[in-house]
Image: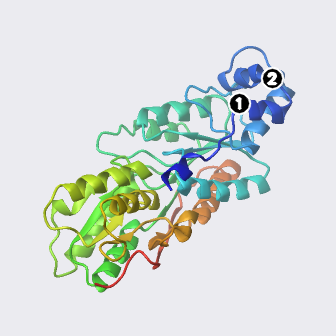
Amino acid sequence: MIEQFKKQERATVRDVADAAGVSVGTVSAVINARGSVRDDTRRRVMDAIGKLNYELPRGARLGGGRRQSKSVGLMVKEAQNPFYADVLLGVREVLSEQGYTLFKTTSEGQYREEGRVLEALRDHGVGGAIVAPVVEDASDLSHLFLIQRRGYPLVLLGEIKGLPVPSVTVDNVRAEKAAVQHLFECGHERILHVSGPAYSQHSQDRLAGFKEAFSESPLRFHEGMVVEAGAGLEDGYRAVREAFAAGGERPTALTCFNDLVAIGALRALDELGLSVPGDVSVVGYDDIEMAAYLPTPLTTVRVPTREIGRRAAALLIRQLTDGPSDTPERVVLEAELVVRDTSRRL
């Protein structure tokens, strides 16, 4: 199952060149702002990049000068996370209707890379950006405040306190509480939370929801009920293997940062000889397409990912056409628990 996710294909420079009817060297020149490229050729390359969902490499400079164009950027934190693939679909639906070209790039959870790419987008005429921000204790967020003060249109997938830009998010605290309360209702008391990466505000909010569910119950939360993983399959696999190898009283249920982490956890539990849900119940988060098609369909929290993309794109277009608002809109969408076969009553 893990190998299946690794085989997702991404557009290459050769694909872009073929679609635009130019050489690989010309595509490289446009991406890296090198040499002289005719305007009509540059437009064909930029259009091909957008249509193919080509992911801009680190260091890309997007040659074309500082002219404002009908193009926007989407910066995510994990390139291979299916969550963002669904968000992307929603963004593209709205942008294509309005004639905008979309460029996708990734910070890979690095706030310095996030700042560098945002400056490159702005400096080379990309009209605005939708950003899944890197937020952790060590993060320097000054680049976001600076680019906002310069008037560059931004929409956040998530929130940063004090940053006056539109945002679209999900009530992660409430949704995680619902997942834990489902396990309480199934009779579980020893629940382990497999958390996400430190740079993710979503991970922080879901952990807060986990703790809040315990604070509102007769059960007591303690730090040993949380193991830090990450956002991917191997992260979930490794974290659960290590947690169960540590000994002590075995958890009867897991809540996981996302479905990829949950799928990794399922593999670890299988290798440990534990059945799901017979020995351990597992709850994921996001409801990616694969979740319903696993050998044991995954109980998870369904996030309206495509709607997140649509709403974010609409907010960005509004800024591009009407200018910034004195009171930036904050959109909070609801997630819902989807009970399938990886959770059961004790």
Q: Position of residue 283 (x, y in %)?
A: 39, 70
Answer left or right for 95 relative to 188.
right
Q: Nearer the viewer, residue 236 or 133?
A: 236
Q: Amino acid at mark 1?
A: Val
Name the residue rendered at 45%, 79% in the picture.
Answer: 339
Please say if 273 is above or below 213.
above
Picture coordinates of residue 302, whole percent (x, y): 50, 71
**Residue occupying the point 61% across, 65% down:** 307
Q: Quadrant of residue 26?
A: top right
Q: Position of residue 244 (x, y in %)?
A: 23, 59
Query: Where residue 137 appears, x then y in whole percent?
Result: 29, 44
Figure quadrant of the C terminus: bottom left
Query: How was this image coloured?
Result: rainbow
Residue 87 visible within the image: yes
Disc 2 versus disc 1: distance between alpha carbons?
9 Å
Q: Say which element carries label 1.
A: helix
Q: Which residue is the site of mark 2?
A: 23
Left or right of residue 3: residue 206: left
Q: Residue at x 44, y 65 (%)?
A: 285
What residue does disc 1 label? 13
Q: Callout 1: few (<14), some (14-19), or many (20+) C-alpha neighbours within 10 Å? A: many
Name the residue type under label 2.
Ser
Residue at 25%, 52% (x, y): give it: 242
**Which numbered circle lies on residue 234?**
none
Of mark 2 and mark 1, the one earlier in the sequence is 1
218 relative to 7, above or below:
below
Q: Nearer the viewer, residue 324 or 293?
A: 293
